[in-house]
Image (spheres, helix red, strand yellow):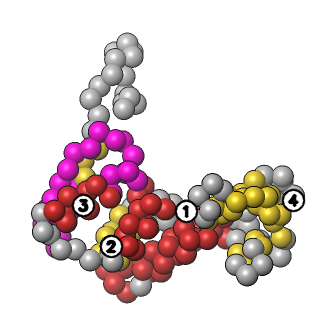
Amino acid sequence: MRMKEDYMRNGQLKPGYNLQIGVISEYIASYEIFHNPADTKTLIPFLEKIKSQNIEIKNVVADAGYESFPNYEYLEKNNYVSYIKPIYYEKSKTRNILTRVENLEYDEKENRLFRKDGLELEFQYYGEDGKTIYFKNPETEKIIKYNNEFRRLSKKSKDNIESELGKQL
């Protein structure tokens, strides 16, 4: 990982680590240091470590840096309650941008995707994973990647955050 600050301006690499800390009732229950700078790739190994230490947790609270489809799938499969803040959570409270994927409505029966103003996006193709669907916005010609399962899990996490318990956590 190349660090942003380079005071000497000589391009030397500095050590960089990603420290994860698990807290239960304001006490540090576990920690781990990762070489990977991305939070999305550290959540699952960190939760596996916590599980191996026989520490039982139910709720996983994390910021938007941890939002990814594999993380959501892992949490659901292992019966964790997700309180991961969606990436555009703060912006979605003040702005309602029609073209944002979280503002689109998907008709699963007919495999159609609509904006809130009624414009239908054109189906293009399915992704290799079989879960991702690509649509084209006829106004902008942009291709939009849509994963209905990811949207469902993200909405579930958002609903958890906005619940009474979520506000307390």
Foreground: 61 or 148?
148
Mark yes or no: residue 164 visible: yes
Mark in the foreground, 2 or 1: 2
Mark in the foreground, 4 or 2: 2
Label 3, label 4: how many angstroms apart (C-alpha)?
44 Å
Which residue does the numbered mark 4 point to in the structure image? 138
Earlier residue among tags 3 and 2:
3
Amino acid bearing label 1: Tyr
Q: Indicate whether 104 appears above or below 20.
A: below
> Residue 147 location, x and y as percent?
61, 65
Which residue does the numbered mark 1 point to in the structure image? 88
Label 1, label 4: how many angstroms apart (C-alpha)?
24 Å
Earlier residue among tags 3 and 1:
3
Question: Image quadrant of residue 128?
Answer: bottom right
Which residue does the numbered mark 3 point to in the structure image? 48
Q: Indicate whether 110 appears above or below 140.
A: below
| Label 3–label 1 contact, CB within 8 A | no
> Residue 151 location, x and y as percent?
57, 70
Q: Secondary structure at mark 2?
A: loop
Foreground: 44 or 15?
44
Amino acid bearing label 2: Asn
Which contiguous range is marked in magenta?
A: 21-43
Say few, some or many: other residues with alpha carbon within 10 Å of mark 4 (under 14 / 14 to 19 / 20 or more). few
**Left or right placement of residue 41 versus residue 98 in this view:** left
Mark in the foreground, 1 or 4: 4
Earlier residue among tags 2 and 1:
2
Q: Indicate whether 54 appears above or below 81.
A: above
Amino acid bearing label 3: Glu
Earlier residue among tags 4 and 2:
2
Label 4, label 2: how many angstroms apart (C-alpha)?
40 Å
Foreground: 137 or 48?
48
Mark in the foreground, 3 or 4: 3
